[in-house]
Image (tube, grey):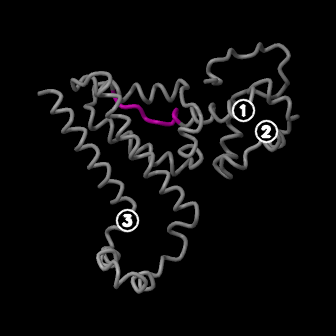
Amino acid sequence: MDSVWFGKPRPSSGQPLGLSREAIVRKAMEMLDAHGLQKLSMRKLAAELGAAPMSLYWHVPTKDALIELCLDEVYGEFTLPDPETDWETAVRAMMRELRQLALKHPWWIRGIGEFNTIGPNAVAYADAMFGPMLRAGLSTVAAAQSISTVGSFVNGYAIAEVNFIGRGGMDSPPPDMDKIADLYRDKHPRYVAMLDEHELWSLERQFEFGLDCVIEGVKAKVEALRS
């Protein structure tokens, strides 16, 4: 596995004037927020910065390295819990913030898993959740598994949510429930009955219900491991 975090920064002598890694990352994040991962190119980024494309490579060796840096910047936006916060409060708060950051930076949630997330901010985020879990009496393995389980639910939910919003979401015309019901009323009456339950169409309530279920499962596992 290669990563931008394994390399050493290049010496300051010989750097193109007017550029810095920080400025490149900042402008790249603006472009990612506006257009997503697929539209980012080093040439377009250089044009936005008013620089020659090759000058960017003094500061970031590859486009993938640049995206790694940008991903870690978003992890730096998390509000880390107080070290003495109990694990459930800490995890709930961070998972809700993860969802909000995914909505703010849709490219970020899509990039997790595709690109390395081992930068200092990402590690600080993970470590901030480990402390409360370990104090609750879990082993390192059990704590890591618990965090991964909760995080997997939130990541999956957030990806589906940003995709939904990306194709119009709440601003697009609502689906014609009567037409959908007419298609399936005879063969799938239970599905049609579900369409009338309006509380199911709240993204907020769906998220909180799922988070409750996963947290309660972890709580049960924590208690079982303690006994």
Left or right for 226, reference 133: left
Residue 116 vs 196, above or below: the answer is: above
Amino acid type of the residue tagged 2 in the rendering: Met
Label whose residue precedes the other's in the sequence (2 or 3): 2
The stretch in magenta equals: 75-82
Between tags 1 and 3, which lies in front?
3
Residue ID at (52%, 62%): 164
- In percent of width and height, residue 106 lies at 56, 49
Label 1: element kind = helix
| SS at mark 2 in the image | helix
Q: Which residue is mark 2?
A: 42
Report x, y in % for residue 7.
67, 17
Tell whether 31 sits left or right of 92.
Answer: right
Q: CA distance from mark 2 to mark 1?
A: 14 Å
| Residue 202: numbered disc | 3
Q: Residue furthest left?
A: 227
Mark positioned earlier in the residue sequence (2 or 1): 1
Q: Main secondary structure of the magenta part?
A: loop
Q: Which residue is mark 1?
A: 23
* Residue 58 covered by magenta stretch: no
- Three-letter code for the amino acid on which mark 3 is drawn: Ser
